[in-house]
Amino acid sequence: MNPVKMSPTQLNAVTLEREIDWFSRVLETVIKLYFEQGSDHDDVREVTPPELSQDTSEYARLVKQHVMSFDERLIFILATIPHIRPQLLDLLFIRNKNLDRGYAEFGGWQGKYHGGFLPTGETAAFILAGQNLARRFEVIRLFESDHFFSSSAILQIERQSEDEPFLSGALILSADTLSRCTSGIKHKPDYSITFPAKLITTRLSWDDLVLAPQVLAEIDVIKTWMQHSNTIMQDWGLEKSIKPGYRSLFYGPPGTGKTLTATLIGAELGVDVYRIDLSMVVSKYIGETEKNLANVFDQAQHKNWILFFDEADALFGKRTQTSSSNDRHANQEISYLLQRVEDYPGIVILATNLKANIDEAFARRFQSLVYFPLPDVSLRQRLWENMLSSRAGLADGVDLAHLASKYELSGGAITNVVRYGAISALQMKRTSINCDDLVRGVAKELRKEGKTI
């Protein structure tokens, strides 16, 4: 009889039950050794972790991918336990009777809503090193920026103050790692105050996007880089001369396809596109803008996302003369942004209606400047025909070629006209859109720009 195939969630659950049991025995051993209560082991490393060589769960894959040592594996499960078996750490709530408080060496912190023991770097050091200074220093090494915990965004120590001991910071498992090691599903962060970016998708295809040939040629350059950057950087040995990543500025009038183009690049290449919400990124409080952006870049660093900054001149605008502390701070923000954009190994696309508003220090560092002009007559006709391709809801006698020739509109404006026309026809209890509906829609769009028919 064939065994029942387990889901990724079930596979992780089976593996984690074994891993939790191992950690429980390690923690029990640590406590007994620390309080000299007598133990079957003289060292926590004698408590053998479960064998994972044949394990196909996502948790096991991650352990094997990074060839985790005993210490690394224990820190990994320690960071995971508050999310899956929080009561296991209640043992560390033991109070020091002499001081009538918890043991400082156990570390730990109290969450705002969570009632359990939340581990810190100190907790990891206590379990793995005890009072052995040499081992303690080895534990600290595991939290440095070049270790795979940090460089692969698995977990980190999050410090609240630079003035406090390094290991006092909270031991935080990344949301992506938690999702992978529990549900087995790739985590896609939600839009929030702490993550001011939104995943953007579209049901449209390149056939629906009407662009001038020179724009499409520039877009092909970006796609080629994304598909073959490893060949250029590594196989051709150019990583010493060329910075990783690709930075492009899309500029041109509203409604000309800048956002849709970025979305379609991601869709074609299987890459997520995140649009940064500038209203939530920019803060009047010193340091908050950098902090908000750092959170986005840190999460994107290892996921190959396309980061799309719409209305980019709000953040990447021209620097001002430093006549006040506010001016100096604004310029510091721009310098910080420039550095993060330059260091990002993926694709960064900035979009603006006015190229002149973008700071020259940024513009010089773009690999491409792509101008999205208003469509000419032939392109406008294609846009009208694409949007009304079925003609099922279009009255006889509507001359789309005439509309394209007479009215200079962007693709976004034509979309609004068609929407208005459909609503107008329904309000008039008709089953089709006539020419008058569309012309009224055109007039409505032109009024937005202070124009008349």
Image (cartoon, helix red, strand yellow):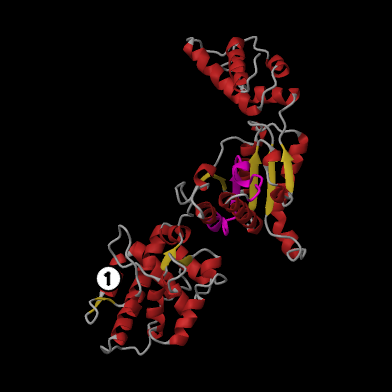
131 left or right of 414?
A: left
The residue at the point 53 percent across, 72 percent down is: 144
Residue 55 quadrant: bottom left
Viewer can see residue 357: yes
Q: Nearer the viewer, residue 300 or 226?
A: 300
**Which stretch appears magenta?**
297-322
- Please state the horizontal and vertical placement of residue 373, each as a whole percent of the image: 72, 32
Q: Is residue 300 magenta?
A: yes
Would you say residue 6 is visible in this rendering? no
Q: Which residue is mark 1?
A: 90
Residue at 47% across / 67% down in the picture?
156
Along the viewing direction, whichever of 121 and 85 lies nearer the viewer: 121
Q: Position of residue 382 (x, y in %)?
A: 70, 25
Residue at the far front in the pictured view: 323
| Residue 136 against residue 203 in the figure, above or below | below
x then y, percent, for residue 159? 44, 66
Q: Is residue 19 above or below residue 97?
A: above
Quadrant hosting residue 453: top right
Q: In which image quadrant can residue 106 be found? A: bottom left
Give neighbour class at mark 1: few <14, some 14-19, many 20+ (Cα, 10 Å).
few
User: What residue sits 71% from the left and 55% below the top?
Assistant: 228
Judged from the image, the secondary structure of the residue bearing numbered disc 1 is helix
Asked if residue 287 lies in the magenta stretch, the reply is no
In the figure, is residue 76 to the left or right of 101? right
**Pick the front one: 440 or 178:** 440
Q: Give residue 11's position: percent from left, percent from top.
A: 41, 62
Say what amino acid the circle numbered 1 marks. Answer: Asp
The quadrant of the picture occupied by the N terminus is bottom left
